[in-house]
Amino acid sequence: MTVSARPAPAPATDLVGLFPPGSHLDRDGELVVGGCRLTDLAARFGTPAVIVDEAALRDRARQYVRALAAHWPDSQAVFASKAFPCTAVIRVLTEEGLGVDVAGGGELAAALAAGADPARIVVHGNAKTDEELAMAVEAGAGTVVVDNEDDIDRLERLVPSGSEQRVLLRVIPEVEADTHEAMATGHRGSKFGLAVPDAVRAAARLRTSDRLRLDGLHVHVGSQLLDTAPFARAVEALGALGELGAHAVYDLGGGLGVRYTYDDAPPSIEEYVRTLTDAARDRLPASARLLIEPGRSLVAGAALTLYRAVTVKPGPRTLVAVDGGMGDNLEPMLYGQRFEATVAARVGGGEPCDLVGRHCESGDTLIRDVPLRAPRVGDTIAVPVTGAYCYSLANNYNGARRPPVVFCHHGTAREVVRRETYEDLLRRDVSEPAQQP
């Protein structure tokens, strides 16, 4: 993945374009998202806080539903919940007709709590435990993606006699994707899935099972892809395995990238879906059922994070330190992901600053050389496009309390996840009797 170079300071209109659709400046220059002024949200809910524009979230889901219906009617979009495993987010997306992809017991619990239809749940993981597979079987999860031979062993032990669990077989397509190496999953030697010869053997074994039903194949090449070509090549790799019978299921994964910075130009949802379905017409049976698993591209742009400037330190490079950082957004540290930011009440322009976090690590830098206009202590700082993987990767480093999630909709704000308390941080401690002197 190429990290974007520092562009010249952007005008306010460009900055607003990185926030959820419909965001605008109020008459006094205040940034408004989901009908709510950002400084008002910071005052009411505190900072750091994750703000979700519910209308933008629903609109992204509807774009996927419409595109799939237009290009391949026998299809289903399944939300890759690892991107934002928040019960309220999952509930909104299931209300819009999406299924849910889970990659662990906690994500499965969240999906069920959100009211997801178990038949539309897809269970992933390269190292699923007995406990997680038992949860999936007991919940009636519609599909388990088999990632290795051990998944087959475990499922055949766990699925009750007389029952049948539908499975997909994950195949390594040996497709190199232009993304950060930590987000590439379809290359040779990937820890996910089986190489084609191993997949052929696993498929033969599954066909003899009296408890597992092989419905089809799964493939995924990576995340934050800004080019559609790798998606088409992955479909070609599945087609090379031959037909699996009438109405076989082909899960084509996810991975569509999003616009984090001014220079990013991701394909539209329409372009992405058309690429997949065109490749499917060339390589897969006409009777196939297609699944796709959007995650980042569904949720990233629907959310932002609010911080409070705690200190402004002049020097060779002005440092603006906020009350969050790597405790609520690890993407810059893990993947070198570039974000943008603005003072919520003074949008656009300004001098380059380093936006740094409060954690005891020199690596706790959110954004280098980001233009901020006259930053001062107490300012509300808004960072757009934080809806994917920021909530997922939030942590308690230095005793940080994970932030709340606030939904905004047509001027009304409501908290759907509260901020952690210090009592929450201590809740798992096991009391021990006092030691006698």
Image (cartoon, grey):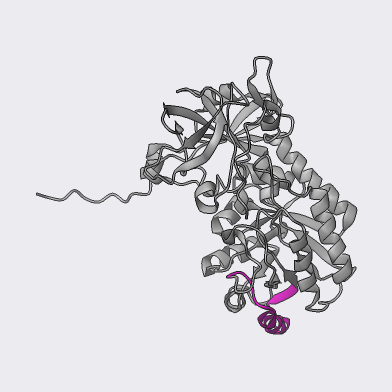
Q: Residue furthest front?
A: 316
Q: Is residue 142 visible?
A: yes
Quarter containing the N terminus:
bottom right
Residue 195 counted in the magenta span: yes
Give me the residue at 71% from left, 40% from top. 57
Give me the residue at 55% from left, 67% from top. 128
Q: Nearer the viewer, residue 162 or 388?
A: 388
Q: Residue furthest left?
A: 437
Q: Position of residue 392 (x, y in %)?
A: 55, 49
**Total number of numbered discs in the rendering:** 0
Q: Is residue 14 left or right of residue 319?
A: right
Q: Is residue 170 visible?
A: no
Q: Position of residue 132 (x, y in %)?
A: 55, 64
Give me the residue at 85% from left, 47% from top. 66
Q: Is residue 327 left or right of residue 211?
A: left
Q: Which residues are magenta?
A: 191-215
Q: Is residue 268 left or right of residue 313?
A: right
Q: Position of residue 237 (x, y in %)?
A: 76, 73
Q: Is residue 50 left or right of residue 91?
A: left
Residue 65 counted in the magenta span: no
Q: Is residue 14 above or below residue 260?
A: above
In which quadrant of the rendered view does residue 119 lie? bottom right
Q: Position of residue 211 (x, y in %)?
A: 68, 77
Q: Nearer the viewer, residue 192 or 335?
A: 335
Q: Is residue 299 above or below residue 151?
A: above
Give me the residue at 87% from left, 52% from top. 69
Q: Is residue 202 above or below residue 28?
A: below
